[in-house]
Amino acid sequence: MATSVVLQKVEKRYGQLDVIHGIDLTIDPGEFAVFVGPSGCGKSTLLRMIAGLEEISGGALLLDNERMNEVTPAKRGIAMVFQSYALYPHMSVYKNLAFGLETAGYKKAEIEPKVRRAAQILQIEKLLERKPKALSGGQRQRVAIGRAIVREPRIFLFDEPLSNLDAELRVQMRVEISRLHRSLGNTMIYVTHDQVEAMTMADKIVVLNSGRIEQVGAPLDLYNNPANRFVAGFIGSPK
Ligand code: ADP
Ligand code: MG
């Protein structure tokens, strides 16, 4: 069973600076939601609050109707995928995949099947002994995603995971992440400033601007019926 994510009047302040202004949002179980908006609008801040890496200044976060505000990141069952350069350079691919499970206290015999399964899903079984520097950009990105899969999270969060890949590889990895979503069925939240990524990958797009939601909807809804000029300009539709 996939997990629902609900934000109720969520706010974030850094000292005197208000960056998120009372966001209400529901992400349905199994949905692929994309947060899109210009740099500095609060996408990463929202994602980090959902992950528990950042405290929520006001409002509530619910996962499967259970309040998470005070729950530690480890207990939320969430994994976050960063850009591929976040791999440990001195460790093999196997070690990179196993490391998080080792620190979480899993035994060797439990870790191995989880690592093998993730490697199989991502088609990197033959690369397990290599170091990251001996991998292509796309292979590295698969390992970064693999580190999330091994933990069997209920939700996957992606923060601009493809932004340091070249254009061709970005297109290929979009397709692979969409395929991963279809095969695992988990709720996923994907942050990008790239309209094309949002349009091609999302079940639901959340358009953010200066810490507020401008519009939420399916890609074609936003394209055909943008709520305002900002959304129209951002999604690239005529209005
Ligand atoms: P995005 O990911 O959409 O580019 P962020 O969530 O990173 O935006 O940032 C939103 C706003 O919050 C920006 O104005 C940024 O400068 C500010 N901000 C982000 N993190 C911090 C922090 N740790 N301390 C102070 N301000 C921050
Ligand atoms: Mg960001």
Image: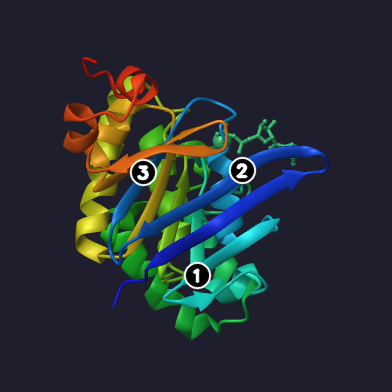
Q: Which residue is mark 1?
A: 62
- Residue 162 image-quadrant placement: top left
Residue 34 is labelled as 3
The x, y position of residue 164, in whole percent, is 48, 28
157, above or below 197, in the image: below
Seen at 29% across and 78% down, the residue is: 1
Q: How is the image coloured?
A: rainbow
Is any part of residue 56 visible from this angle? Answer: no
Q: Nearer the viewer, residue 52 or 132?
A: 52
- Residue 146 image-quadrant placement: bottom left
The x, y position of residue 48, in whole percent, is 60, 52
- Residue 71 image-quadrant placement: bottom right
Q: Secondary structure at mark 3?
A: strand
The x, y position of residue 29, in whole percent, is 30, 67
Q: Which residue is mark 2?
A: 20
Dot 1 amino acid type: Leu
Q: Going from the N terminus, do you reach mark 2 or mark 3 first?
A: 2
Q: Is mark 2 within 8 Å of ligand 1?
A: yes
Calculate the distance from the C-alpha at mark 1 to the C-alpha at mark 2: 17 Å
